[in-house]
Amino acid sequence: MANPQRTILAADGAERSEGLIVAQRLGATAKAIEGQFLKTGDVLAGAVDGVGELINALDKLAKAMDQSMVDATTRDLGVAAAGLRVLPEGLAGRSVALERLETLSRELSAHIGDMHQNLAYLRVVSLYIKIAAGGVEGDNGDFALFAQEIADCLVVGRDHLESFDADLRLLDHDLRSALIYEANLRTHCAELAADAPDAIEANARQLATQRVRVAGVAADVAALAREVRKKVGGVLVALQIGDITRQRAEHVQFGLELLEGLEGDLVGERRERVRAAMLALLRAQLSATIDDFRGEMAQIERNMVGIAADTREIMKLQDLAYGRVGRDEGGDFLARIEAHVGKALTLVEEMAAADQAALEVGQSVVAAAARLSERIDGILRMQANVHQMALNATLRCARIGEAGKPITVIAVELRGHAAKLEESADRTLAGVESLMSGAAQVGGEGATGTAAISDVLQTALSRIRQAGGAADADIVDLARQGGAVVEAMNQASARMDCRREIGQALDEAAAALDALPSAPFDPSMEADEALRACLKVLYARYSMAQERDVHRAVLGDLDAEPDTPAEVQAPAAEPDLDDVLF
């Protein structure tokens, strides 16, 4: 019984082995804590970078619909809507002008009939002159030559008239085709123009409203993003509990190893007192370590749940702001506006094509009218020649006396029909001039003004497509960045599940530590030099304020030590968040 403890220790090392087993278990737990928390810290550090990228993506998305873009596009859409409303009026005016041209063309056809009839009479009268000339004595064939000259002039007049008729029929065909085209276009225009201006104006209002909405959501999202970054930074700071827990577990491990080595030099009651004091201290240290670890980890877990929720809310807000959700609203509002503007632009382009076609018709009419005018001029020249020849015949007959009277009568009739031909030609020429004037209205003043509307629609559509394309790219980037942050949070949360495993390992170590045999500890016992020496070694190793607090709570007066080691540090100040993040 002189030294039962030493005998027990020397016999099989059972107690010593139990303490070392607990120490080894704590060492393994400390290494596991270090590995898990280092990896989690790396993941969260990446999440901080991800939140920064998320904020940048949100800024880019907001710039896709900045105020200047919205103001300019809204203004252009308003101008386009006003222009679209008057398109049917311009189209109706052009149709009236085309119908007027078609009417003039029909009237010219009637004048052609009159001139054909006049030429027929003139041909008959020229034959009468030829017949009558045969009975005039001393004529020497002059009247027969005169009759032939008239016949030749009438052939020229007939050729001019037939060319005029052919040109007029071609013009009439073009005008009828243009009228059919315009009628179809009016129907199509009535269908589209009835809704297009209202839709465009509604788009302009929606764009302005959406800008206000986006600005508000952008502010909310920015605040959320800052909160997410702050929370992630807070979690990074809180993860120091891993390093603290590791150190404290290692300190308990060190204390057990120190006690194991010290007990070999102590015997009897002294050994039991030192053992009781040391185990009481180490048990209290490990218990406090476990409590602090669980408390901090619970707070970290709550913060990480909040971070993931805030990140999902950011994604939800951007969806609401940019119309990417809500099937009842038809999806992406920029795409809807683009579709409406594109539809209006298609209508305007059709009208522009009609304007061009009408311009070509007008130019064709002008060219045809010029040709018709030349034909009429030829007929009038022919008529003037016939009239002059008839007058010359009358004068010649007057000189030859009674024998020339029959030809005189015929010449008078010839001048009469020539005068009627002139009247018909003058009416036709007036109709041609009216045709030329009407043609200018079809392609000039009668144009619908689609060029200006097309320009503003093209400009607005370009801005909308640019904004939509940028928004699409930025939303993809935003979704990627937001997804990366959420994934980082998920990974960190998964790694935080180790707190249960680590907590269980610490609990098992604490239970094993509690199970180590020892006498009851009496804080009022007299200090032992061996205990003081042991505590001095511990003080030299320990540097945490929490551990010194535990020492004082457990050991009381036994904790007093005059020579506080330089290694013992004051409680660390709370790290500044900016220092952690940046």
Image (cartoon, rainbow, N blue to C red):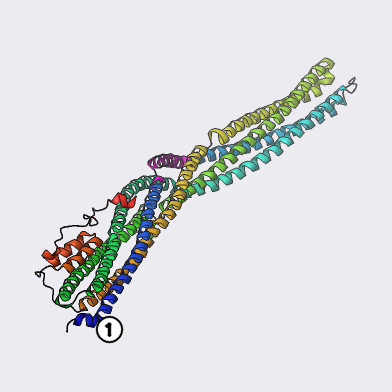
Image quadrant holding the N terminus, namely bottom left
Nearer to us in this view, 262 or 450: 262
Residue 76 colored in magenta in the image: yes
In x, y percent, where is residue 30?
31, 68
Q: Circle 1 — which element? A: loop
- The secondary structure making up most of the magenta span is helix
Residue 220 in view in this figure: no
* Residue occupied by mark 1: 12
Residues drawn in magenta? 62-87
Which picture quadrant has residue 530?
A: bottom left
Residue 525 colored in magenta in the image: no
Residue 481 in view in this figure: yes
Nearer to us in this view, 337 or 321: 321
Q: Is residue 558 above or below residue 511?
A: above
Q: In this view, does 75 lie above or below 232?
A: above
Which picture quadrant has residue 426?
A: top right
Q: How many numbered callouts?
A: 1
Nearer to us in this view, 469 or 455: 469
48 left or right, relative to 130: left
Rendered residue at 16%/67% (across/down) = 529
Using a 10 Å C-alpha cutoff, classify the residue at mark 1 as few (fewer than 14 neighbours), some (14 to 19) or many (20 or more): few
Q: Is residue 121 above or below residue 463?
A: above
Nearer to us in this view, 45 or 403: 45
Which picture quadrant has residue 248?
A: bottom left
In x, y percent, where is residue 236?
31, 57
Rendered residue at 66%/37% (across/down) = 109
Amino acid type, residue under disc 1 in the picture: Asp
In x, y percent, where is residue 522?
11, 72
Q: Residue furthest top?
A: 399
In x, y percent, where is residue 278?
19, 71
